[in-house]
Image: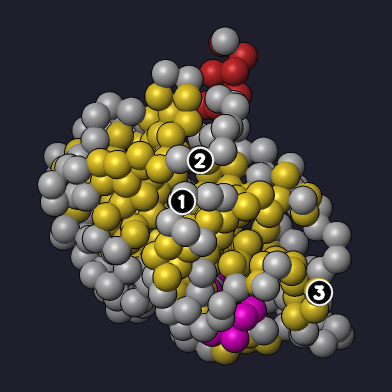
C-alpha cells in the first residue's frame, strides 16, 4: 500500500508548488513559423506510441480531439489518428481555446525558436505560433485559459524576470499580468487550474485537500468540496468536471460551484496508481468528454459519460 501511495504522490508532483504571485509586461507579439525544411502538414499517424501526455482539449477551430505531448500534437478525428509533420514541439500546459490553442514548452530542435516558449498561441493547428508572454524566460506546467480567451492564468514555478512564484492572471490575453491574492486559500498545495469557458473571472484549482473556486480571478477563494485529493478538473458549462482519489478509488464527478450539488459519472475501472491526469470537455458539445491517466490511457465519451471508448492504452492506439 505504501508503494502505491508513493507512486500516486509522485505523479501528482504538480500540486506541491509555493504560493506567491507576479506582474509582467508581455513580449512583443509576432507570428513565428518554423525553419524546419519539412513542410507542415497534418497526416494520418499510423501507429501511435506516446511516452508523455501533456494535455488534451477540443480547440474551437477544429473538430478533432487534440493531444499534446513531448513530440508535438496528435489529433483524433473520425476514428483516425493524425499528426503534424513538423513543428513537433514539446508542448506543456496545453489549453484549447475557441480560436486554437495556448501552450508553453520547448521548441523542436532546428525550429529556430527560442527555449523556453513562455506562453504561445496557435490559431492554425500548430503551423505557426504567436508569442503571448515570457518568451525565452519561463515555462508553465500549470496554465489555464478561458475558451473565450477572456481569462488566462499561470502558476509561476520559479523566480524569473518579472515573474514571482504563485498564481498570476491576465484579462488581456497576456499583455498585462496581476497577482492573485488567494484570500481564504488554506491548502498546502497548488495544482491544476481551470477557467469558466465564457467568464474569465471564474477559476478553480485542484489541491490535495479539495477544489478551491473563485469568481474574482483567484483573489478570493472558496473551498467547494470536502478535503479530498483532486487530480484533474475542467469546466463543463457552469459546473466543474473533476476527478478525485478517495478510499483508494478513482472517481469522476461534477459539482455546481454555486450550490455545491455533486453527481457521479461512471467510468471504466482504473487502478489506484493510475489516476486521471487531464480532463477535457468540448464547449461546442458538452456531451463530448475525454480524460487521460497517469499510465497514458485515453478515454473519450460522446454521450456525456454514459459510455467510453478506449482510444489509447499505455500510450498506444487500441
**Label 3 Cα neighbours within 10 Å, binned few <14 / some 14-19 / many ≥20:** some
Is 90 situated above or below 176?
above
SS assignment for the magenta stretch, majority: loop
Q: Which residue in the structure is indicated by mark 1?
A: 305
Is residue 87 something one can see in this rendering?
yes
- Left or right placement of residue 128 versus residue 60 in this view: right
Q: Which residue in the structure is indicated by mark 2?
A: 267
SS label for mark 2: loop
- Left or right placement of residue 128 versus residue 235 in this view: right
Q: Is residue 122 magenta?
A: yes
Is 31 situated above or below 306?
below
Mark 2 and mark 1: Cα distance apart in space? 7 Å
What span is colored magenta in the figure?
117-126
- Left or right placement of residue 242 versus residue 278 in this view: left
Pointers 2 and 1 in contact (C-beta within 8 Å): yes
Q: Quadrant of the N terminus?
A: top right
Percent position (x, y) of residue 186?
Answer: 21, 33
Q: Residue at x 46, y 83 (%)?
A: 99
| Between marks 3 and 2 in the image, the one whose residue lies nearer the viewer | 2
Q: Earlier in the sequence, mark 3 or mark 2?
A: 3
Mark 1 and mark 3: Cα distance apart in space? 27 Å
Amino acid at each position: 500500500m505504501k508503494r502505491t501511495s508513493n507512486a500516486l504522490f509522485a505523479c501528482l508532483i504538480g500540486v506541491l508548488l509555493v504560493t506567491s504571485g507576479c506582474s509582467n509586461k508581455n513580449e512583443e507579439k509576432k507570428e513565428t513559423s518554423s525553419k524546419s525544411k519539412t513542410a507542415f502538414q497534418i497526416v494520418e499517424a499510423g501507429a501511435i506510441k506516446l511516452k508523455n501526455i501533456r494535455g488534451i482539449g477540443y480547440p474551437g477551430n477544429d473538430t478533432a480531439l487534440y493531444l499534446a505531448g513531448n513530440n508535438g500534437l496528435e489529433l483524433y478525428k473520425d476514428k483516425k489518428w493524425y499528426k503534424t509533420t513538423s513543428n513537433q514541439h514539446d508542448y506543456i500546459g496545453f489549453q484549447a481555446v475557441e480560436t486554437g490553442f495556448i501552450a508553453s514548452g520547448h521548441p523542436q530542435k532546428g525550429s529556430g525558436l527560442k527555449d523556453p516558449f513562455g506562453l504561445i498561441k496557435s490559431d492554425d493547428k500548430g503551423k505557426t505560433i504567436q508569442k503571448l508572454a515570457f518568451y525565452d524566460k519561463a515555462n508553465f506546467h500549470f496554465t489555464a485559459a478561458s475558451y473565450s480567451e477572456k481569462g488566462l492564468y499561470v502558476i509561476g514555478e520559479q523566480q524569473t524576470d518579472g515573474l514571482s512564484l504563485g498564481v498570476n492572471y491576465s484579462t488581456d490575453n497576456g499583455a498585462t499580468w496581476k497577482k492573485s491574492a488567494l484570500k481564504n486559500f488554506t491548502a498546502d498545495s497548488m495544482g491544476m487550474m481551470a477557467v469558466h469557458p465564457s467568464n474569465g473571472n471564474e477559476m478553480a484549482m485542484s489541491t490535495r485537500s479539495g477544489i478551491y473556486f473563485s469568481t474574482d480571478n483567484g483573489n478570493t477563494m472558496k473551498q467547494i468540496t470536502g478535503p479530498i485529493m483532486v487530480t484533474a478538473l475542467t469546466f463543463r458549462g457552469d459546473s466543474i468536471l473533476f476527478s478525485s482519489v478517495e478510499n483508494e478509488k478513482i472517481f469522476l464527478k461534477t459539482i455546481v460551484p454555486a450550490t455545491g450539488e455533486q453527481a457521479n459519472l461512471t467510468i471504466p475501472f482504473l487502478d489506484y496508481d493510475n489516476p486521471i491526469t487531464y480532463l477535457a470537455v468540448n464547449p461546442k458539445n458538452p456531451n463530448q468528454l475525454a480524460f487521460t491517466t497517469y499510465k497514458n490511457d485515453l478515454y473519450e465519451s460522446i454521450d456525456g459519460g454514459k459510455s467510453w471508448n478506449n482510444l489509447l492504452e499505455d500510450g498506444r492506439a487500441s
